[in-house]
Image (cartoon, rainbow, N blue to C red):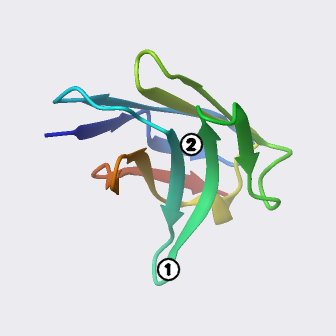
Amino acid sequence: QVQLVESGGGLVKAGGSLRLSCAASGATFQTYGMGWFRQAPGKGREFVADISWTTNTTHVTDTVKDRFTISGDNAKSSVDLQMNNLKPEDTAVYYCNADIPGRRVWGQGTQVSVSS
């Protein structure tokens, strides 16, 4: 069974930085790509960034692309999200995902809170 474990969330002041990490474990599987979504209080889950091992490309949503960077290691089935110059509107639960044959797997989420 594939499991994703996130780490690196926390409380930070506006302008600060955090680095989120996610690692997959469990049964042997092929990961096509991994990424991050976030869900702010009272809002739906939104895409933040992803990395594709099959196309060797990354995507970061326009609203954060000048502040967030995604990186990953296909061999380790891991992905990181470097978040700089954080703003209060970045406050959310951040979820890691991995695309494996037939489905998308989600982590439990890690809380990121940015104070003004």
Q: Amino acid at mark 1?
A: Gly
Quadrant of the image for the C terminus? bottom right
Q: Percent from the top left, x then y, of residue 1?
A: 13, 40
Q: Residues within 10 Å of mark 2 (few under 14, many from 20)?
A: some
Q: Quadrant of residue 100?
A: top left
Residue under the point 41% across and 17% down: 76
Q: Percent from the top left, x then y, of residue 110?
A: 37, 48
Mark pair 2, 1: CA separation: 23 Å
> In front: mark 2 or mark 1?
1
Q: Amino acid at mark 2?
A: Val
Numbered mark located on residue 17 in the image: none
Q: Secondary structure at mark 2?
A: strand
Q: Which residue is mark 1?
A: 44
Of the two numbered discs 2 and 1 on the same chain, state the one appearing first in sequence.
Answer: 2
Q: Percent from the top left, x then y, of residue 29?
A: 28, 31
Residue under the point 49% across and 39% down: 32
Is residue 50 rendered to the left or right of residue 42?
right
Q: Percent from the top left, x then y, of residue 7?
A: 37, 33
Residue located farthest toward the bottom when viewing the structure as drawn = 42
Q: Which residue is mark 2?
A: 12
Q: Residues within 10 Å of mark 1 (few under 14, many from 20)?
A: few
Q: Secondary structure at mark 1?
A: loop
The answer to whether 41 is drawn above or below residue 103 in the figure is below
